[in-house]
Every structure is written in structure tokens, then in C-alpha cells.
Amino acid sequence: MYGEGCFGGEPFFVANEDGVEEDDGYLVSYVHDEKKGESRFIVMDAKSPELEILAEVKLPRRVPYGFHGLFV
């Protein structure tokens, strides 16, 4: 789902403040690319059947597997 050689953490749902439907919001997650050695924070559209990526931020350090967004 995240691409070849990429592995993600547990996604976290963030509701849209003005949303009225159950899936009106975003899924956010950390993704690590094993080949490049890079970590990214991604924001996906929760209503999109393919979970379209809306934003992607390259992180300066590797995020360990099992890290949860709730700890930030």
C-alpha cells in the first residue's frame, strides 16, 4: 500500500471539524522506506477508496516501527 520497500505505522483518524459523515476526515501515518532509509509523515483522504495522499512530509530522522501518533 505504501510502495515497494515501504512500511507504515498504525494509521490514526483525524476528523474534519466541519464533517458530517463518519469518514469525513484524514488518515495520518508514518512511513519508512527501507531502500532509501527515509521516513515520511503522510496525510490521506479517508473518504478516498484508494486513500489518496494529500500531503507528505520528509522527516529528518527515522521513525521506529510501532511508534504511534498519539504519543506525540
Image (cartoon, rainbow, N blue to C red):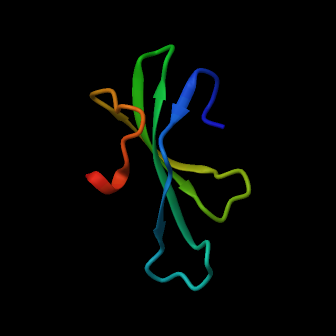
| Foreground of the two, 65 or 58 | 65
In the rendering, at what x and y percent does residue 70 appear?
33, 57
Looking at the rendering, in which quadrant would you find the N terminus?
top right
Q: Image point 33% across, 27% down: which residue?
A: 62
Q: Image point 55% across, 27% down: which residue?
A: 6
* Residue at the front extreme, as displayed: 66
Q: Image point 34% across, 33% down: which residue?
A: 63
Q: Image point 48% across, 74% down: which residue?
A: 16
In the rendering, at what x and y percent does residue 30 appear?
43, 41
* Quadrant position of residue 65: top left
Horizontal side, residue 47 vs residue 62: left or right: right
Position of 36 relative to 62 (above/below): above
Position of 50 relative to 63 (above/below): below
* Residue at the right extreme, as displayed: 49
> What is the total number of numbered labels drawn onto the structure image?
0
Horizontal side, residue 48 vs residue 7: left or right: right
